[in-house]
Image (cartoon, rainbow, N blue to C red):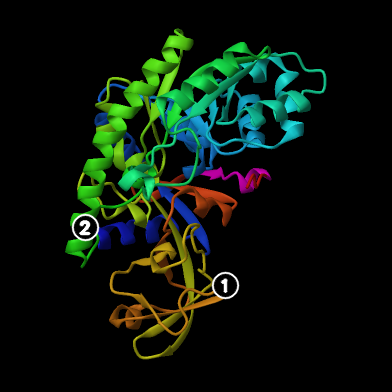
């Protein structure tokens, strides 16, 4: 029996009393992935990206482990909810235009001390000030550095279009603007190198593309390490007591941690290990989050149909954004239909061994987005469900 077949047998036994559709997290794999992230971080704390987890119980679980500290959130409303729930170090990773949220933040000393907001433009400071509604609490601020690699005088750009702050001078200028402005305190710098951390460098069947990605990433790492260090020096000249410099992502943990200027690493997807993280040479994780759909039809030889399953991930549309049938091994989509909203035909010889009511296990393309589809995660240890934890959706929250 292969390791994957053994996992399927465990998951089927553990959930035999539960009807699909359902979602699980294998806690043995989750914990092993957490240990690997902490090991690769080399002693620097890992800040957990909540959008890749979206379950408070699992955020609490990983933050209780050595090597993890703080949350990186994705909306202001989520940040405030987490802070009210007892999480005392929440870094909002994206600028917000949530005026009601800013009014709540500026009016509550507990929230203001726990939540740090992201800015990259003085207009965002203006929006916060206009939204205070009488609140006088000092707002903690983090500046985001654009990590993109610019070549040929800027005519070629590699990386996500995020912050407009690219040079040390630009970041230092905004740091001075924050330092001069009453009601704000600059506490950190963030730089997310998505073109390194979020792009696999070993694409199956594409050796030339894989080599090109590795060359690009090596160049980008060198350029960013030098520029990030210069940015940190420039900002510390303005704010000597800067609390943190955050960088990295699941795919770049060990590289980012090696930079002296970085004080903490951000990661989250590496806990669940969705399918987009299969194509990396620098680490190998264990799939921990899966969902099951029930077989509801047997249209013919070599084909079964499961209920639903059309859960595409965000990003540029393409086959890599689709979940993949994972267990039993050997199933594939019908290219004429793909994964559907209400039914998904699956082809392959493994289909002939499946009966009506059997479960087919899938992996999502991304991590936390799976939790937007399910109210609860069934937590498995060994071959038993030992707990059931609500997702954000299960707690009544769909923040974005």
Task: Judge left or right: residue 253 versus residue 92.
Answer: left
**Residue for point 55% across, 31% down:** 120
- Residue 334 is one of the magenta-drawn residues: no
What residue occupies the far bottom of the structure in this picture? 300
Observer-nearest residue: 233 or 339? 233
Magenta part of the chain? 388-396
Residue hosting label 2: 210
Observer-nearest residue: 291 or 256? 256
What residue occupies the far front of the structure in this picture? 153
**Residue for point 38% across, 64% down:** 320
Report if residue 18 is visible in the image. Answer: no
**Residue for point 35% across, 80% down:** 351
What separation in Å lies between label 2 and label 1 (alpha carbons)?
A: 33 Å
Query: Residue 24: x and y, percent?
Result: 45, 52
In this view, the mark in front (2 or 1): 2
Q: Is residue 400 above or below residue 135?
A: below
Query: Residue 88: x and y, percent?
Result: 56, 20
Observer-nearest residue: 95 or 41? 95
Query: Residue 194: x and y, percent?
Result: 38, 44
Q: Is residue 30 above or below residue 4?
A: above
In the picture, residue 99 is in which quadrant? top right
Residue hosting label 1: 341
Q: Tag 1: Cα neighbours inside 10 Å, few (<14), some, or many (≥20)?
A: few
Task: Judge left or right: residue 350 versus residue 12.
Answer: left
In the picture, residue 229 is in which quadrant? top left
Report if residue 190 is visible in the image. Answer: yes
């Amino acid at each position: 029996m292969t390791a994957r077949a053994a996992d399927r047998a465990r998951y089927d036994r553990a959930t035999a009393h539960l009807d699909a559709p359902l979602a699980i997290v294998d806690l043995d794999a989750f914990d092993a992935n957490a240990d690997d992230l902490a090991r690769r971080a080399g002693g620097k704390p890992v800040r957990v990206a909540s959008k890749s987890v979206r379950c408070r119980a699992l955020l609490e679980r990983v933050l209780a482990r050595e090597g993890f500290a703080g949350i990186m959130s994705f909306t202001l409303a989520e940040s405030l909810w987490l802070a009210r729930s007892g999480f005392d170090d929440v870094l909002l990773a994206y600028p917000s235009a949530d005026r009601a949220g800013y009014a709540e933040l500026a009016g509550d000393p507990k929230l203001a001390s726990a939540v740090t907001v992201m800015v990259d433009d003085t207009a965002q400071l203006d929006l916060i000030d206009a939204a205070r509604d009488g609140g006088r609490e000092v707002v903690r601020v983090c500046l985001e550095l654009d990590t993109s690699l610019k070549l040929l005088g800027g005519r070629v750009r590699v990386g996500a279009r995020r912050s407009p702050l690219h040079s040390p001078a630009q970041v230092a200028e905004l740091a001075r603007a924050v330092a001069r402005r009453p009601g704000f305190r600059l506490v950190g710098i963030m730089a997310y190198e998505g073109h390194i951390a979020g792009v696999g460098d070993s694409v199956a069947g594409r050796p030339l593309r894989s080599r090109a990605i590795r060359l690009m990433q090596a160049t980008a790492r060198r350029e960013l390490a030098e520029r990030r260090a210069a940015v940190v020096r420039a900002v510390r000249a303005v704010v000597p007591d800067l609390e943190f410099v955050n960088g990295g992502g699941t795919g770049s943990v060990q590289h980012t941690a090696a930079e002296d200027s970085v004080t903490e690493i951000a990661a989250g997807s590496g806990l669940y290990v969705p399918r987009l993280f299969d194509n990396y040479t620098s680490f190998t994780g264990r799939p921990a989050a899966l969902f099951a759909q029930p077989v509801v039809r047997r249209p013919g030889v070599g084909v079964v149909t499961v209920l639903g399953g059309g859960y595409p991930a965000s990003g540029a549309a393409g086959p890599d954004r689709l979940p993949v049938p994972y267990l039993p091994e050997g199933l594939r989509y019908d290219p004429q239909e793909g994964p559907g909203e209400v039914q998904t035909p699956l082809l392959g010889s493994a289909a002939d061994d499946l009966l009506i009511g059997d479960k087919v296990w899938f992996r999502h393309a991304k991590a936390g987005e799976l939790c937007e589809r399910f109210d609860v995660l069934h937590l498995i240890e060994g071959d038993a469900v030992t707990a059931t934890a609500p997702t954000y959706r299960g707690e009544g929250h769909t923040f974005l």
